[in-house]
Amino acid sequence: MPNPRLAHRYAKSLIDLSVEKGQLEAVYADMKYLQAVCKASKEFVNLLSSPIIKADKKVAIIKAVTGTNIGELTAAFTNLLAVKGREGDLPEIADAFVSQYNEIKGIHTVVLTTAVEISEDLKQSIQAKANSANASGTVELETKVNEKLIGGFVLEFDNKLVDASILRDLNDIKKQFQDNHYIPTV
């Protein structure tokens, strides 16, 4: 069950510890790696939250999956999570850590969803435009593909949404036909 308060607290503690140890950038890279692993493998996330598998087995599996890709501090943190029975919250903690790191560094995440994959040139052009428009930090562009959009794009940034998709237009037209004020209702 998602627990954002718990994830926020663990992430805050890890940020404070990594700043104290002078390893904030290394731990950030580790959390981005763990976040990518969790997004790529649903089985790994299910394993972490499984009550059947013992904590020591989970620690061994985490070590096998991460190998030498994470630092000593992050490895100790994941071990602590397993000891405390919180290893199932690792994906959410990684997301909270990245979010808090971005807030500290002034990095804004922009999510661009399109119907088809866009080229690298277009991605770089959009990111450059967003960086020039944003004076208070840098912009990190994340792209997604959703074929249901049919065409156009959906842009999410700073809790704002710009929906310029064909799907949205078609839904608006459908709603207008359903709410036809010229046909009397009985």
Image (spheres, helix red, strand yellow):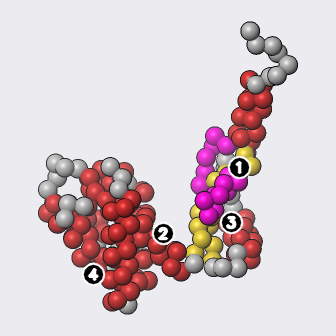
Q: Which residue bears the numbered disc 4?
A: 72
The residue indicated by pointer 2 is 99
Looking at marks 2 and 4 on the same chain, the residue that comes earlier in the sequence is marked by 4
Which-is-in-front pick, marks 4 and 1? Answer: 1
Which quadrant would residue 91 be assigned to in this image? bottom left
Q: Provide the residue designation for mark 3.
A: 123
Mark pair 4, 1: CA separation? 43 Å
- Dot 1 corresponds to which residue? 163
Q: Which circle's residue, 2 or 1, is located before the other in the chain?
A: 2
How far apart are the alpha carbons under marks 2 and 4?
22 Å
Q: Which one is closest to the eye, mark 3 or mark 1?
A: 1
Which of pointers 3 and 4 lies earlier in the amino acid sequence?
Answer: 4
- Amino acid carrying label 1: it is Asp
Type of amino acid at the residue the image marks with label 4:
Glu
**Residue 69 rendering spot, x and y as whole percentages:** 34, 75
Residue 43 is at least partly visible in this image: no
Q: CA distance from mark 2 to mark 1?
A: 23 Å
In front of the other: label 3 or label 2? 2
Task: Tell me which amino acid carries mark 2.
Answer: Ser
Nearest the eye: 107 or 144:
107
User: Does the segment drawn in magenta span residue 66?
Assistant: no
Q: CA distance from mark 3 to mark 4?
A: 34 Å
Residue 71 appearing in the image: yes
Q: Residue at x 42, y 77 (%)?
A: 28
